[in-house]
Image (cartoon, rainbow, N blue to C red):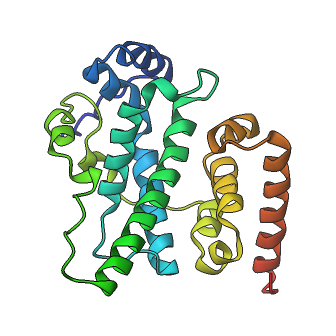
Amino acid sequence: MTDMPEPWKPAAGEAEAAWQTALSGDREAFQKAVAPYLEELFKAARRERRYRIALGDLTADDLTAEEIAGETLIRAWDDRHDRPPELGLRAWLLAGMFRVVSDIVRREGRFRRTAAVSLERPVPPDPVYDDEGFWEWYQPDEVTRWEDVLADAEPTPEEMAATDEEFNRSLPPLARETFLLHEVHNVPMREVALALHVPERQVMHLLAEARKRLRRAARGEAS
């Protein structure tokens, strides 16, 4: 039996060249630019969804990992001119995903508070991840599709730590995001600083704190 060919993905260099074309408004070039990072983005979105559900920020019915990744890509398209040229596209997308989830959590929280006060007020507009305009054009035939990135991969020890509920709860959000970007996604510290809009010295401090808490968690000590 002949194996099915792997879906085509552009190399990182080709993706960056496609990004430059996407800046002029070429959506097909945008698809090619983000294609090498879709699998990693989806896994990160799935992890973030589990984390937010564990914290009680979201329920399992609020949205899917696919919707998180979809909104991240919508925002990346809309904000493509804001990406600093020295910040890699992969790191920019991952950091953007964190901001998207934070915005969704705030929006859902406001909606729940409003609903608790009055059920007579108008329902808020649909979230941007339901934007049909995006899904009409984001149907790449020759790049990675969502079904190509759904398969679970064996997590690394770093990923297991990053998804551990107690470890996640023990870290402030910024320290957690710093740890995930640098330790799990191997983003250089300089890019982590750019992506999270913090000084590089603060990144070093946040990483040191995260590692200390991880060591304590591994020993079963309280944070």
Query: Residue at 77% of width from left, 64% of height from top?
Result: 210
Q: In the picture provided, is 83 more to the left or to the right than 29?
A: right
In terms of image quadrants, where is residue 119? bottom left
**Could you tell me which quadrant the N terminus lies in?**
top left
In terms of image quadrants, where is residue 135? top left
**Could you tell me which quadrant the C terminus lies in?**
bottom right
Above or below 199: residue 20: above
In terms of image quadrants, where is residue 120? bottom left
Q: Whole-percent x and y of residue 3?
A: 23, 40
* Camera-nearest residue between 120 and 138: 120
Specify whether residue 153 is in view. no
Query: Residue at 39% of width from left, 64% of height from top?
Result: 107
Above or below 88: residue 54: below
Q: In the picture provided, is 45 more to the left or to the right than 61?
A: right
Q: Whole-percent x and y of residue 22?
A: 36, 18
* Camera-nearest residue between 150 and 68: 68
Q: Whole-percent x and y of residue 100?
A: 44, 52
Above or below 189: residue 206: below
